Image (cartoon, grey):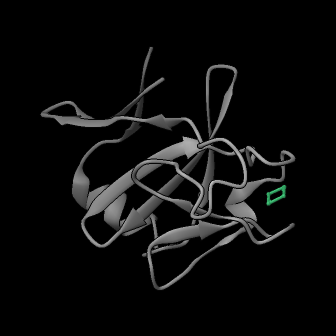
């Protein structure tokens, strides 16, 4: 399914601070949404290790989201954990059109 996040890229940039994760709900899914520079990323909010909320984590200098519970590190594009200590996060495509910015999940 496709869920509208923002009216425009400019609005996304205005609302989302650089590298500050945000929790969004799309249907029955909790998604961690992140703007890094001009790019938006979306992935499951529940850490694939033991389910901690990733939107309370930090983004490090390698553009990885660091889980606050056991500090596992996940690539924000691919969802892969840096040392393969657990499964990858499910990632969700972000699409843009004249109607707005959407997440596909
Ligand atoms: S719950 Fe996220 S690293 Fe353990």
State whether residue 18 is above or below residue 100: below
* In this rendering, position of residue 47 left or right of residue 79: right
* In this rendering, position of residue 80 left or right of residue 25: left
- Residue at (84%, 53%) from the top-left corner? 52
- Residue at (84%, 45%) from the top-left corner? 51
- Residue at (29%, 73%) from the top-left corner? 37
Decide which of 75, 46 is in the foreground and name it: 75
- Determine the residue located farthest toward the front in the rendered image: 84
State whether residue 18 is above or below residue 33: below
- Residue at (62%, 20%) from the top-left corner? 27
x and y percentages locating residue 69 in the rendered image = 87, 66
* Number of marks present in the image shown: 0
Quadrant that contains the N terminus: top left
State whether residue 41 is above or below residue 38: above
- Determine the residue located farthest toward the bottom in the rendered image: 61
- Determine the residue located farthest toward the top in the rendered image: 1
Decide which of 24, 43 is in the foreground and name it: 43
Decide which of 105, 82 is in the foreground and name it: 82
Decide which of 17, 57 is in the foreground and name it: 57
């Amino acid at each position: 399914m496709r869920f509208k996040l923002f009216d425009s890229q400019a609005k996304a940039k205005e609302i989302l601070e650089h590298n500050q994760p945000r929790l969004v709900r799309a249907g029955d899914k909790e998604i961690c949404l992140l703007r890094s520079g001009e790019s938006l990323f979306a992935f499951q909010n529940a850490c694939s290790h033991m389910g901690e909320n990733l939107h309370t984590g930090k983004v490090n200098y390698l553009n990885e989201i660091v889980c606050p519970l056991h500090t596992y590190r996940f690539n924000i594009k691919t969802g892969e954990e840096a040392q393969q200590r657990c499964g990858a996060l499910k990632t969700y495509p972000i699409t843009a059109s004249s109607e707005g910015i959407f997440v596909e999940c």
